[in-house]
């Protein structure tokens, strides 16, 4: 079972994936996934990821929280600015 840092890095990955997913949704003119579903998926992944990274941070491991937060912003920006038309 994952513990401590492992769950924190899983949370960081969830934050990055949620950021990328939201960035692709924002940049797309149309999406196969309705806005409500996309919002629920990204919000769920973000909340779970943030909870896991905060738990790791409180265990004195700040790497997952910083990586997840910065990575989510970078992934969203990457998805928006490299969108295919």
Image (cartoon, helix red, strand yellow):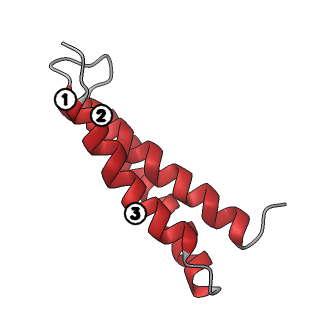
How packed is label 2: few (under 14 Cα within 10 Å), some, or many (20 or more)?
many
The residue closer to the viewer here, 37 or 42, is 42
- The quadrant of the rendering that contains the N terminus is bottom right
User: Residue 28: x and y, percent?
Assistant: 20, 23
Separation of marks 3 and 2 at Cα, in angstroms = 16 Å
Q: Write the residue at 45% across / 49% down.
A: 16
Residue shown at 77% from the left, 69% from the top: 3
For numbered disc 3, what is the local secondary structure?
helix
Task: Give the CA distance from mark 1 to mark 2.
Answer: 7 Å
Left or right: 45 as drawn, with respect to 11: left
The reply to whether callout 1 and callout 2 are in contact (CB within 8 Å) is: yes
- Kindly identify which numbered label has been placed on residue 27: 1
First in sequence, mark 1 or 3: give its number: 1
Name, please, the residue furthest toward the top.
85
Q: Residues within 10 Å of mark 1 (few under 14, many from 20)?
A: some
Relative to 26, residue 74 above or below = below
For the residue pair 44 and 11, the one nearer the viewer reads as 11
């Amino acid at each position: 079972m994952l513990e401590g840092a492992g769950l924190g890095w899983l949370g960081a990955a969830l934050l990055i994936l949620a950021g990328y997913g939201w960035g692709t949704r924002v940049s797309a003119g149309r999406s196969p996934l309705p806005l409500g579903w996309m919002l629920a998926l990204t919000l769920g992944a973000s909340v779970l990821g943030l909870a896991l990274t905060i738990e790791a941070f409180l265990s004195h491991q700040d790497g997952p929280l910083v990586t997840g937060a910065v990575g989510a912003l970078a992934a969203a920006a990457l998805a928006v600015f490299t969108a295919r038309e």
